[in-house]
Image (spheres, rainbow, N blue to C red):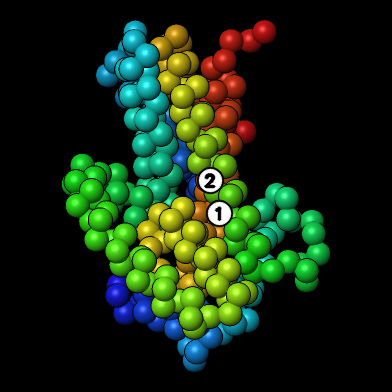
């Protein structure tokens, strides 16, 4: 674990490393394409730092959504009946 | 019959594997405490549901990803981790300060920003603290896709249960 961490610092600092800059760039572009706001922008003008920052923000917003949905489900669970037959029904609807 | 067919047909998609696990957990949570009266227990249940959602997604992904292993490890050992985290918080703060001082001298502004972004990512991606940059970005992309699926499925369950107007 600790050797890996020190290797990542080296590659971040630009010194020789087995992972090439191209590979990192490819991944940054892949991340950018997963971001709803940046997906349709031209990829050339976006700095890696910006993509990483927006990725963080997007993940945080997804975390908040999961929190909110868990709250909603907690409320809904106390008012609705969820039996195994209903679970089967939900499964069907979800998997269509 | 029909429903069985659908399940096997989509049996290999991540969405299906997550949905099946999560719905199973929800049924168990409901059976364990059918009615919830106070706000406190309602909140406690939300956090249990969130844990169930995370565990369901991580186990649907399986052990091939670092982030899913980290999620499952954290959930299984959360009491112990909580106690350890409190102990280590102070010593980590000191180390972080020393690290930052060193970095300022060596790196240019753009590189500094990039590293800052990567370090922030390490905080939001489970297990990210111990990944090298390549692994971190790769895991982040996968983790993001899974979070999207998680939100999508949870949202459809909420929609199904919400009273129709």
* Crowd rating for badge 1 (residues with CA inside 10 Å; few <14, some 14–19, many 20+): many
Where is residue B103? Give x, y as percent.
Answer: 45, 76
**In the rendered image, residues at marks 2 and 1 fall on the same chain:** yes
Can you name the residue that lies furthest to the bottom here? A16
Where is residue B165? Give x, y as percent.
Answer: 67, 8
Helix, strand or loop at label 2? It is: helix
Q: Which mark is residue A95?
A: none
Look at 37% across and 35% down and name the residue there: B52
> The residue marked by circle 1 belongs to what chain?
A
Front one among A44 and A84: A44
Look at 37% across and 22% down and name the residue there: B43
Cβ atoms at labels 2 and 1 below 8 Å apart: yes
Look at 34% across and 30% down and name the residue there: B48
Q: Is residue B155 left or right of residue A4?
A: right
**Residue under numbered circle 2:** A60
Helix, strand or loop at label 1? It is: helix
On the question of residue B154 being in view, the answer is yes
> The residue marked by circle 2 belongs to what chain?
A
Q: Which mark is residue A56?
A: 1
Where is residue B35? Give x, y as percent.
Answer: 34, 9
On the question of residue A18 being in view, the answer is no
**Which image quadrant for residue B10?**
top right
Q: In whole angstroms, how far apart are the C-alphas of marks 2 and 1?
A: 6 Å
């Amino acid at each position: 674990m600790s050797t890996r961490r020190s290797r990542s610092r080296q590659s971040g600092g630009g010194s020789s490393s087995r992972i090439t800059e191209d590979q990192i760039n490819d991944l940054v572009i892949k991340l950018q394409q997963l971001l709803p706001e940046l997906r349709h922008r031209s990829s050339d003008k976006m700095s890696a730092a910006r993509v990483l920052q927006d990725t963080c923000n997007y993940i945080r917003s997804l975390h908040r959504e999961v929190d909110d949905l868990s709250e909603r489900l907690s409320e809904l669970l106390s008012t609705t009946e969820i039996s195994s037959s209903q679970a089967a029904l939900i499964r069907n609807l979800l998997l269509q | 019959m029909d429903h069985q067919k659908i399940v096997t047909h989509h049996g290999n998609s991540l969405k299906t594997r997550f949905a099946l696990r999560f719905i199973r957990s929800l049924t168990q949570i409901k059976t364990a405490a059918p009615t919830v009266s106070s706000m406190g227990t309602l909140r406690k249940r939300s956090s249990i549901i969130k844990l169930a959602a995370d565990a369901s997604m991580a186990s649907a992904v399986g052990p091939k990803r670092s982030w899913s292993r980290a999620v499952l490890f954290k959930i299984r050992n959360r009491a112990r981790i909580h106690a350890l985290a409190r102990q280590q918080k102070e010593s980590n703060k000191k180390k972080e300060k020393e690290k930052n001082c060193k970095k300022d001298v060596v790196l240019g502004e753009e590189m500094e920003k990039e590293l800052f972004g990567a370090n922030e990512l390490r905080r939001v991606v489970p297990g990210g603290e111990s990944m090298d940059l390549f692994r971190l970005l790769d895991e982040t992309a996968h983790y993001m896709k899974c979070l999207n699926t998680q939100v999508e499925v949870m949202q459809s369950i909420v929609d199904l249960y919400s009273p129709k107007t």
